[in-house]
Structure formats: structure tokens, C-alpha cells
Image: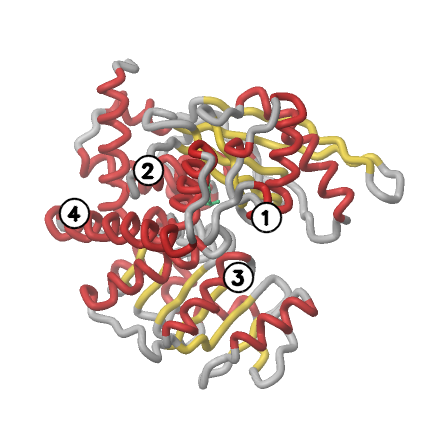
Amino acid sequence: MPRAAPATVVPADSDLAAIEANPFAAVNRYFDLGATAAGIENDYRMLLKTPYREMRVEVPVRMDDGRLEVLIGYRVQHNGARGPYKGGVRYHPEADLDEIRALASIMTWKTAVVDIPFGGAKGGIQVDPKPMSQNELKQMTRRYTEHISYILGINRDIPAPDMNTNAQIMAWMMDAYGSKHGYTPGIVTGKPLELGGSPGRESATAQGVAYVLQAAAPELDFKLQDARVAIQGFGNVGSWAARILDKMGCRIVGISDIMGGIYNGDGIDVPRLLKHNADTKTVKGFKGCDELDPGDLLTCECDILIPAAVGGVIDAEVAERIKAPVVVEAANHPVTPAGDAVLERRGVIVLPDLLVNAGGVIVSYFEWVQNIQEFRWTLARVNEELERFITDAWRQVRVTSLQERLPLRIAAYMIGISRVMEATRLRGYV
Ligand code: GLU
């Protein structure tokens, strides 16, 4: 459902209901808690919250049946104090301006927490791409890229995949950009290997989730071996998480996608499920499991809950009913501020998005470095460096949370905000 545009770019944080309903206001609620912990003055808060540049473009597409569809696309560059703007592009009916602003700002804090030399951005087209043909998708992608190309650049803004976009779409983006500016593989990350993509980029977000879980489990006193895991979403992140955690010895008991959900307390046969999903494009109907209403996945019986789909799915009401003692935010902003308060009161451990799903952008950084070096790393090197970056970030977030007596989420915001503030000061920006 498209939301009404807010009156100001940065919504006031006085009205709790409005904060819950507006994703950018919700992220800024967490920002404010982190900024208070970091001791950021009021005028600098406004500077750090406000997106640097927002571009809205029309994206006309001639559909296969001859109709002309005029879609709307965005690219929001939130903050570039620490390096080129960086962030994915999503194709989704809910990808309106406030959602893209929220996601762009999350990228600013995420790249800072894991200490890679990028700022934050996000793009999107407000569309349901599922029924579209390859030809329609290609046209749409090329048009969108041409229209935002003025603000892209290998040292300016580097898109990547996000929801409903993949390596093929990055290849089309690279080609559309290259046709104007010359061959520039480093203009997007998440490309196919054949076009300068990095080994391990497709699995990177889920691999990062697994590395954080391995580092956090002994310190936060939960077990991974045989732990019952439920995953909301079976796109890139959800399906790779199922595969990697299954191999690590977790028991994947519940999975849902937009079509349906499945549950098996003894553990789902993940390799067979991947085949079923490749054939039918859904987890629904997979034999040997109980059917689960997708709405019940978040509250099913499990030890580790992994939302890996859209934002805002865990509000106060859902948070009250969650049975898992550990929530792992593989999606961006899956928990609303009111939901977060409930989880905190109930003592549920939340591993926050800024840290836990940063594997994707970390390996995007490695891909960009490889493109600049014109050199290819091995998968082993990519995963080794990914583990080092994300485990270091986990340690820093954990130590800050203990020292400052803050929830992990706010500790992560505090670290990210402090780094961006320091870069802003050092550059003499204002
Ligand atoms: N879309 C991913 C994210 O939300 C990756 C972004 C990137 O690689 O630039 O972090």
C-alpha cells in the first residue's frame, strides 16, 4: 500500500503511532537512541538524519501485450561522509520514498558499523516484478539505470542487488551505464562471475548471518547444534541461510514465503526443498511438512527466528507472541520500535540488522576492490575476509553494549553514528 508523503523530509518523533507507521521515522527512532548514547548535539542530529540527495524518476515500460506502464523509481543517497554511496536496488510494491529513505539510512549506519569505506544509499522501483517477463524486466532496469546514471559513479554511488533483484539485473545495469560512460564493471556489485562479480557474493548475506551466530552463540549462551530455526522469506537471503545453517548442524523447522509456509519439528530436508522451490517457485506444497499460514511463521515454536523478508513485520502485537528466545534480523528493519520495546522487556535476544545482515555489503566491497584491482580473489579468501570483518564488528558491538549498558541494536547505532560524525568533522563539512 503506498503511504502518504510526509510533510517534512525528517518526520517529527513525537507521535508514536506515526513512527510505527513510517519506516523512515522508525529507523530515526533507533538513530535518536544511538545518537543520545554517542552524545551527538541536536543540529548535527538533523544533519545526520537528512538524506543528502533524493532522485525520483519515471520508468516507462512497453509491456509484452503492447500496454505502456509508467512506473516510478527512486535513488536516495543518504550520507557520503565515509566514502561513495552504497546500497541495493529493490523492486517491490512497498518501495515508496519513505521505505527507500529508511533503507538508505540503514546502509549509512551499516557500512560504518562494519567499517568499510562507503556511505549509504538505496534505490527501488515501486512495482511487483513477479508477473513481469524477462524482456519487461530488462527494459525496466535499463530505463531506470539510464535515468539515475547522472548520480552514479564508481567513486560516487554503487548499486547492488536487494529484494527481487539479482546478478542478471546487475548485468543489465552495468551494460546500461556502460553504454553511456564506457565499460565500468565497478559501477555495480553483485554481478555475475562472468562479468566481474565476486565469488561468494550471492551467499554473502546469509554467510555473514552464520558467522555472527557462531561468534555470538557462546557469548550470549545459546546453542546452534540442533537449534530449531524458523526463517521468514525464501529469497536470496532466506534460502542461503537455510542451506548454510542446515549444513552447520541447525535444524530448519519452519519456512515461509509470500505464497505459503511449511513446518516440520523434526527438521525440513533443505536440499530437497531447494529443488522443490526451483521447480514451483514456492515452498508451499513441500511434502513431509505441515502447512503453515505464512502469518504464523513468526510465532511458531523455534529456538532461533530469522526474519529474512520485508521490514516492519514484528510489531508490538507479534512481539508479544514470539516464542523464540533469539531473533536474528537478516531482513532490514524487520522489528518496529514498539515491537523492539516488547522484545527487550521479554528478554528476547535481538541480533540487529546493521550488524547481522552486513555480509552482503561487505562482499560487495570486496567485489568493488577486485574490480578496481582488475584481480579475482578465491572464494576461500572472500569468506575468510568476510568472517574477519563481521566478527570484528560483532566484538565491537558486544563490548560497547556491555560497557554502555545498551541493547545490541543501540550499541550498533552508537558505533555507526560516531564514525560518521567523526568523518563529517574531520572533513570540515560544516
Ligand atoms: N542490499 C544489501 C543490503 O541491504 C546489499 C547492499 C550492497 O551490497 O550494496 O545490505
Residue 305 occupies quadrant: bottom left
Q: Nearer the viewer, mark 1 or mark 3?
A: 1
User: Extreme right residue here?
Assistant: 66
Give the number of the disc on residue 116.
Answer: 2
Please report the residue visible at 28 percent of the width from the left and 64 percent of the height from the top.
Answer: 214
Say which element carries label 3. loop
Q: Is residue 233 left or right of residue 71?
A: left
Q: Earlier in the sequence, mark 1 or mark 3?
A: 1
Which residue is the site of mark 1?
Answer: 166
Q: Which mark is on residue 400?
A: 4
For label 3, count other residues whose C-alpha is less than 10 Å away and answer few (under 14), some (14-19) or many (20+). Answer: many
Looking at the image, is mark 4 or mark 3 earlier in the sequence? 3
Looking at the image, which is closer to me, 22 or 76?
A: 76
Can you give x and y, in whole percent of width and height, for residue 154 in the image? 48, 27
Q: Nearer the viewer, residue 332 or 366?
A: 366
Q: Quick check: can you spot residue 1? A: no
